[in-house]
Amino acid sequence: MQTLIRHATLVTATSCAPGDLLCDDATGRILAVGEPEAVAAAASPDARIVDATGLHLLPGGVDPHVHAYLPLALTDAKTDYAQCTRAALLGGTTTICDFAGSGAEADIDAAYARWEETVADTGAFCDYAWHATVTRFDLETRRQLEARLAAGHLRSLKVYLAYKPALAISDPDLLALLDFAAANHLVTIAHCEHPDVIPYLQNHLFASGCTGPDAHEPSRPPYVEAEGVTRFLTLAAATGAPAYIAHISSAAALAAYARFHDAPSLAARFPLLAAETMPHYLLLDDSRTHLPDFQGAKFILSPPLRTPADQDALWQALRDGPLTCLSTDHCPFDFDGQKTLGRDDFRRIPNGIQGVQERLPLILHHGPRHGLTLSRIVDLAATTPARIFGLSTKGRLAPGCDADFALWDLRHTQTLTQATQSIPTDYTPYEGFTAAAPPVAVYLRGRNVVQSGALLPDLPPLGQLL
């Protein structure tokens, strides 16, 4: 059966105008979009009509940086595929990209097997894709990556310059991996922080009596992040590999990225050069880690929260460039029993906060107040992430694309609290924040999956591995 959305305001990465949209339930694809007369002409007589008067219709969000499942040495992130993907849909996101591998697996194949098993255990409610986490580049790693390439199951890689020895890849291995990525048109995502300076500063601070959450940011200062960005992009430029900088948090790291992005002779070395930031770097600052009674631990993540001046720089870079994507690094933990593992030692506080449900409501409310148009938000949060990572049927409102979209009533707002979230953590880092009201309806491949801010009753896991 067909569904005809009428009288909406259609928002794409390039336009915001009244229009209609027709999709087909059987194929899950958009059939027509735009002028009401032309769309109506393509509709069957028995098409299901949805009146979207007063509502904005946006493509389903694409979040390219999510940890839907993450086992760590001290504790596991408090999320699984069912929880994470339900939360994504409730926040208007219809596609997430996770990372296959935590660094503890024997190799690439073992990492993928572990992720396949965890999805099989719970199911996924939205569509998902995997970046391959690579911690070393030897002959066996190359063989396994080549096999996935041959099967058409590899588009992107993830490397960590930090977290030595569990995750950090060495410079020689990274250079060889980037050479491989360049030859095979693979996007390499990098967590950019210096792997040796961080433990040096952590241990120095701890030895001097700085044991609380407020020591986290000084242990990973902006220059440590900026050095990582420069080093990664230097190696990527040498090889001509497509490069993507994860979670830029500071003006210093942004400037390091911009030196490559804005210099024609350097930018020409990259077939793709992109970077992301997250809502928490835009809306939360490092004063949160100074809260009393260890409450600052709720805001520990890496790279750390920075200053209001850093936030201003990031907002400008989202509005005017060179930042290209807005993602979340969703990685939630409880305060009690998880964050409190580091009560006497900030080095043991699990790094991460949630965000997959809150991303679009927060940016749709706060973005326009910082000069972002709705079209720019769609570009940052859906269209460009889908394009970068080869998800050709996602993130756009166009015939032939997946009918992934959300209807929003931007005249209304909500106040975020622990009670408004679906992730079962004992707090939200966005307590008390104003955000756009939850989407009125969300469609995944033409099927209505969210209505009036709630998942439809008895909704089965419909998510597909892309």
Image (cartoon, grey):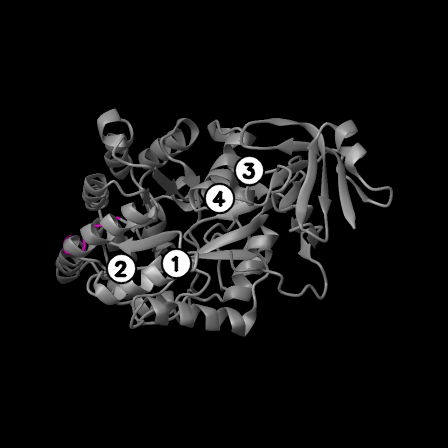
* Amino acid type for the residue under numbered disc 4: Ala
Label 2 – label 4 distance at C-alpha: 39 Å
Distance from Cα at disc 4 to Cα at disc 3: 19 Å
Residue under label 4 = 386
Give the image quarter of residue 248: top left
Callout in the foreground (2, 4): 4
The secondary element bearing badge 3 is classed as: helix
How far apart in space, not on screen, are marks 2 and 3 (Cα)?
34 Å
Mark 2 or 4, nearer chain start: 2
Q: Earlier in the sequence, mark 1 or mark 2?
A: 1
Query: Which circle marks residue 280 in the picture?
Result: none
Helix, strand or loop under label 1? helix
Tag 4, which secondary structure? helix
| SS under mark 2 | loop
| Front position in the image: 356 or 446 | 446
Q: Are marks 4 and 3 in contact (CB under 8 Å)?
A: no
Q: Amino acid at mark 2?
A: Gly
Q: Nearer the viewer, mark 1 or mark 3?
A: 1
Which amino acid type is shown beneath numbered disc 3?
Answer: Leu
Up the image or down, 309 lies above or below 112; here it is above
* Span shown in magenta: 192-197
Which circle marks residue 212 in the picture? Answer: 2
**Residue at numbered disc 3:** 364
Lower sequence index among marks 1 and 3: 1
**Where does label 1 land, which residue?**
150
Taking the image as shown, residue 147 lies to the left or right of residue 9, namely left
Tell whether position 194 is magenta. Answer: yes
Percent x, y for residue 371? 48, 27
For the point 62% across and 37% down, which residue is it?
398
66 part of magenta stretch: no
Which class describes the residues within 10 Å of circle 4: few (<14), some (14-19), or many (20+)?
many
